[in-house]
Amino acid sequence: MIRAIIVDDEQLARRGIRARLERAGGYHVVAECASGREAVAAIREHQPGVVFLDVQMPGIDGFGVIDEIGAERMPVVIFVTAFDNHALRAFEAHAFDYLLKPIDDVRFATTIERARHRVVEREESGVARRLAALMNDIRPALGTEQGIARHPDAADAVATPVNRIIVRERDRVLLIDVGDIDWIGADGDYVRIHASGRSHLIRDTMAAMENRLDRGAFVRIHRSTIVNTSRIRELRPYSSREYAVILRDGTRLRLSRRYRERLRNNFGAFL
């Protein structure tokens, strides 16, 4: 069950969200809050996976709640509001989604299903990072290398990882959450981002993209391929030194010898 908190100064609005979550199943409402100050305390106490957050409230508004907690420590945030003029600021505050009142039932169902996947991915990514840290800790005792091996063509300066990638498509601009990315491949003078069953072409280099991503969550497995390690389902040997990387959706990618050491830092010395 995913722990959820509902924050809205209108009791009727809170009741409506709770009823929808109960019908959908899979969510457990651990707190309801009528103000931003109550929300800050409840989030810190319950550590929910998802928070449904109203924008306009007396005292601390929805954005103030995020400022108090810190965007990097917030659960998955779904803004719920009667006004659409806050949408851009909501996404700048790293909101997962933005629902308008009155809430459309189909839209709500789609959002909470996507949110469910995001919570699971966050948990799995956290496990992967802890496992990688554990492997680094125990390697000295096993007589293996310490730390993360640097590849000859890796950038010397590592940028702060981004949370979203901006993609311009014709008459619109998409903001792709990094956590939604399955893998990235080189495509001529471009890179193609594969995320949530779709692909997006942007003019960039693989080196620049690699430098922009969290190297604990993403790893380069080939000169033309970067993969989200949480999407890897299995590794199959091609030969004594090469593997096929199989993702959850069945996508097969090649792990080249040149980049094998990078994946070894995530999954151990059996490679």
Image: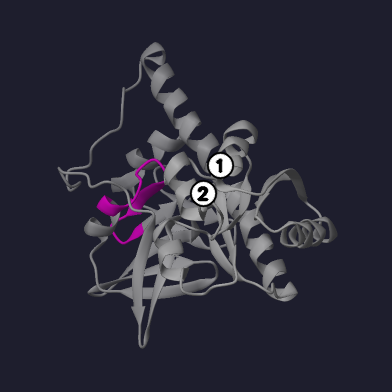
Q: Is residue 70 visible?
A: no
Q: Secondary structure at mark 2?
A: loop
Give the answer, above or below, for where 174 lies relative to 96: below
Q: Residue furthest bottom?
A: 171
Q: Which mark is residue 59?
A: 2
Crowding near pointer 2: few (<14 within 10 Å), some, many (20+)?
Answer: few
Which residue appears at 33% of the width and 51% of the height? Answer: 213
The answer to whether 56 appears left or right of 164 in the picture is right
* Colouring style: one colour
Distance of label 1 from label 2 (alpha carbons) = 7 Å
Q: Which mark is residue 247?
A: none
Which residue appears at 60% of the width and 69% of the height? Answer: 99
Q: Which residues are magenta?
A: 211-225
Which residue appears at 40% of the width and 11% of the height? Answer: 141
Q: Residue furthest left?
A: 156
The answer to whether 163 appears left or right of 20 in the picture is left
The answer to whether 50 appears left or right of 240 in the picture is right
Q: Is residue 172 magenta?
A: no
- The residue tagged 1 is 37
- Count every numbered label the image shows and give the total: 2
Crowding near pointer 1: few (<14 within 10 Å), some, many (20+)?
Answer: some
Residue type marked 2: Gly
Q: Position of residue 65 (x, y in %)?
A: 50, 47
Check the picture and name the quadrant holding the N terminus: top right
Q: Earlier in the sequence, mark 1 or mark 2?
A: 1
Residue 192 position by quadrant: bottom left
Q: Is residue 19 visible?
A: yes
Q: Are marks 1 and 2 in contact (CB under 8 Å)?
A: yes
